[in-house]
């Protein structure tokens, strides 16, 4: 994958630089750069949604925290390797790439309705004639249009691609048209009948229904994955060396759950806090990356 090759070269440069960065670079008062993926429909709403979390971290860490929305999971993973981001709230696949090629480290996982896991899914619309994933994989699905998320997405790309490969289906050959776009656009276009089917995840579908952006009866789930680890809070390789600061970041994140009753704006609806995790929690994503060939084995 072109992205992984680009990220690998960036990581090689970045890690050689990080090796001599003094711990003084994390001195009290030094701004920390918080990168957040595009979880909301647009950058302005995304910034507004996650600004309270950035402000909470700034207050607890005693230093400025600069919030930056990054358009793609790939871009966010690269930003951890090249020094543009110190801390990132990012999708699982983006995290695995950043860990594999730039030694970024997960320190926490976000909770959704009290759980650290979620599901990938495939959706269609009720007029498509596709009643099941077997229909999608078989003659009824051949020549149809199918939408993936961007290639840095776990549920929108990696996991459904892994499923197709396990079934012996090459999406580029099986479908007549394959798109790569944003999760919100997938649901919008599928429910409008502009695309026959697409990959998404349960949290996005539920949020769009709750917000009135799509009608539930126009979005039909025909496949769901095994549980996947939720979005990761990862830190750069340089920051991870400062164990005291990492613990303060984790402690600040653990405080978010209890604070939500009084400060519900700290997280989007249905998110209920954070739990400390480590790299082992993301093994299912890493395994899928290796199985699909999208992640090169370490030498």
Image (cartoon, rainbow, N blue to C red):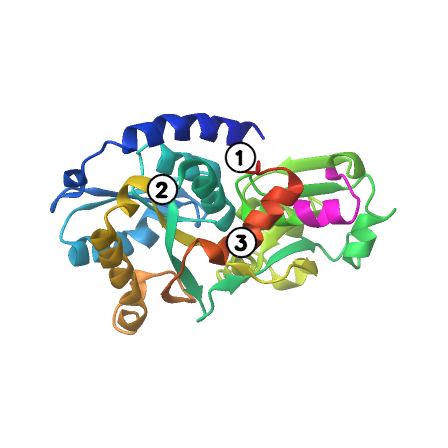
**Crowd rating for badge 1 (residues with CA inside 10 Å; few <14, some 14–19, many 20+):** few
Of tags 1 and 3, which is closer to the observer?
A: 1
Q: How many marks?
A: 3
- Residue placed at 52% from the left, 27% from the top? 5
- Point out the frontmost of discs 2 and 1: 1
Labels 2 and 1: the sequence-earlier one: 2
x then y, percent, for residue 104: 38, 43
Disc 3 marks which residue?
283
Label 3 Cα crowd, 10 Å radius (few <14 / some 14-19 / many 20+): some
Which residue occupies 80% across, 39% down?
Answer: 174
Q: Can you identify the residue that label 1 sits on?
A: 299
Q: Does 18 sit left or right of 73 as displayed?
A: left
Query: What residue is drawn where x is 64% and y is 37%?
Result: 293
Q: Residue at x 53, y 54 (%)?
A: 283
Q: Nearer the viewer, mark 2 or mark 3?
A: 3
The residue that mark 2 highlights is: 69
Q: Which residues are magenta?
A: 161-171
* Residue 226 shown left or right of residue 208 in the figure: right
Separation of disc 2 and disc 1 at Cα? 33 Å
SS at mark 2?
strand
- The circle on residue 38 is none
Q: Is residue 157 visible?
A: no
Looking at the image, the residue that sits furthest to the left is 28
* Label 2 crowd bin: few (<14), some (14–19), many (20+), radius 10 Å: many
The quarter holding residue 181 reads top right
Q: Earlier in the sequence, mark 2 or mark 3?
A: 2
Query: In the picture provided, is 143 more to the left or to the right than 222?
Result: right
Q: CA distance from mark 2 to mark 3?
A: 26 Å
Residue 289 coordinates in the image, percent (x, y): 59, 44
| Residue 89, position as x, y percentages in the image | 38, 50
Q: Is residue 162 magenta?
A: yes
């Amino acid at each position: 994958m072109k992205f992984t090759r680009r990220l690998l070269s960036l990581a090689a440069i970045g890690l050689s630089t990080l090796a001599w960065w003094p711990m003084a670079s994390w001195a009290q008062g030094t701004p920390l750069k918080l990168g957040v993926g595009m979880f909301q429909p647009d950058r302005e709403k995304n910034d507004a949604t996650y600004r309270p979390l950035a402000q909470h971290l700034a207050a607890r860490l005693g230093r400025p925290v600069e919030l930056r929305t990054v358009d793609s999971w790939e871009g966010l993973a690269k930003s951890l390797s090249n020094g543009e981001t110190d801390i990132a709230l990012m999708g699982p696949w983006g995290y695995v790439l950043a860990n594999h090629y730039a030694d970024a480290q997960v320190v926490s996982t976000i909770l959704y309705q009290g759980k650290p896991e979620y599901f990938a899914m495939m959706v269609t619309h009720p007029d498509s004639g596709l009643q099941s994933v077997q229909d999608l994989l078989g003659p009824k699905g051949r020549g149809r249009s199918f939408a993936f998320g961007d290639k840095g997405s776990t549920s929108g790309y990696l996991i459904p691609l892994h499923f197709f490969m396990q079934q012996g289906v090459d999406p580029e050959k099986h479908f007549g048209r394959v798109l790569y776009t944003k999760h919100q656009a997938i649901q919008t276009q599928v429910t409008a009948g502009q695309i026959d089917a697409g990959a998404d995840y349960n949290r996005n579908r539920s949020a769009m229904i709750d917000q009135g952006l799509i009608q539930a009866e126009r979005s039909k789930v025909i496949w769901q994955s095994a549980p996947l680890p939720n979005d990761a809070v990862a830190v750069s390789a340089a920051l991870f060396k400062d164990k005291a600061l990492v613990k303060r970041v984790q402690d600040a994140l653990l405080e978010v759950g209890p604070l939500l009753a009084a400060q519900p704006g700290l997280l989007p609806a249905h998110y209920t806090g954070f739990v400390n995790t480590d790299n082992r929690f993301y093994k299912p994503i890493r395994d899928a990356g290796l199985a699909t060939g999208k992640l090169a084995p370490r030498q």
